[in-house]
Amino acid sequence: MERQKQQKHYTPKEALIKAAAYCAYQERTQQEVRTKLYSYGLEPDDVEELIVRLSQEKLIDEERYAQSYVRGKYGLKKWGRRKITQGLKSKGISDYCIKQGMKEIDLDVYEENLLNLLEKKNATEKEKNPFARRQKLSYFLMSKGYENDLVQDALKKLEN
């Protein structure tokens, strides 16, 4: 007979210690922490109180989270601004924090990422028809979150 994993209930004091460790491990959004606190079996009032306390102690900082998210996605995954913004919105980050996070993007590096992605994809693209090839490259870059005007400029540079 399989045993159901018993969900442990914590007191607000115990939950604060666990949540602080959870936040110290990596940047978290308020919503991620809220979900975690509810999983500890806390009441809504206790959850909100702990969220405020963790924010005051700078363990939760959505602006810092947005900056970290932007650095990771554009630096490592080479995502474009549209996809990064969409990702942050889906995590419940405010427009102000998103704007602050987007300041982490260096435009020269951003365009360099776009051109590098285009060159790599162009080298592996098997399509021979120039129109279809251009369209496939364009779709690829747009799916990575790059803006249409930048994609078109990059494709023109590639053709010259």
Image: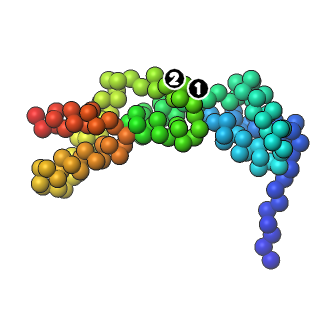
Q: Is residue 150 left or right of residue 76?
A: left
Amino acid under disc 2 = Gln
| Residues at discs 1 and 2 in contact (Cβ within 8 Å) | yes
- Check disc 1 and give the amino acid type: Glu
Pick the front one: 25 or 85: 85
Q: How many neighbours does mark 2 have within 10 angstroms: few (below 14), some (14-19), or many (20 or more)?
A: some
Q: x%, y% of residue 124?
A: 23, 51
For numbered disc 2, what is the local secondary structure?
helix
Question: In percent of the image, x 87 and y 36: which residue is there?
Answer: 13
Q: Which mark is residue 89?
A: none
Which image quadrant for residue 108? top left
| Identity of the residue drawn at 32% across and 43% down | 142
Give the camera-side residue of 13 and 98.
Answer: 98
Whole-number angstrom distance, CA of label 1 to CA of label 2? 7 Å
Residue 120 placement (x, y as % from top left) = 26, 44
The quarter holding residue 33 reads: top right
- Left or right: residue 132 versus residue 151 is left
Quarter of the view holding residue 50:
top right
Question: Which callout, 1 or 2, points at the residue further toward the start of the chain?
Answer: 1
Q: Position of residue 144 (x, y in %)?
A: 36, 43
Q: Is residue 52 visible?
A: yes
Q: In this figure, which colouring scheme has been used for the structure?
A: rainbow
Q: Which residue is mark 1?
A: 63
Residue 76 is at least partly visible in this image? no
Give the quadrant of the N terminus: bottom right
Give the label on residue 100, or none: 2
Q: Residue at x 45, y 37 (%)?
A: 84
x then y, percent, for residue 92: 59, 38
Q: Secondary structure at mark 1?
A: helix
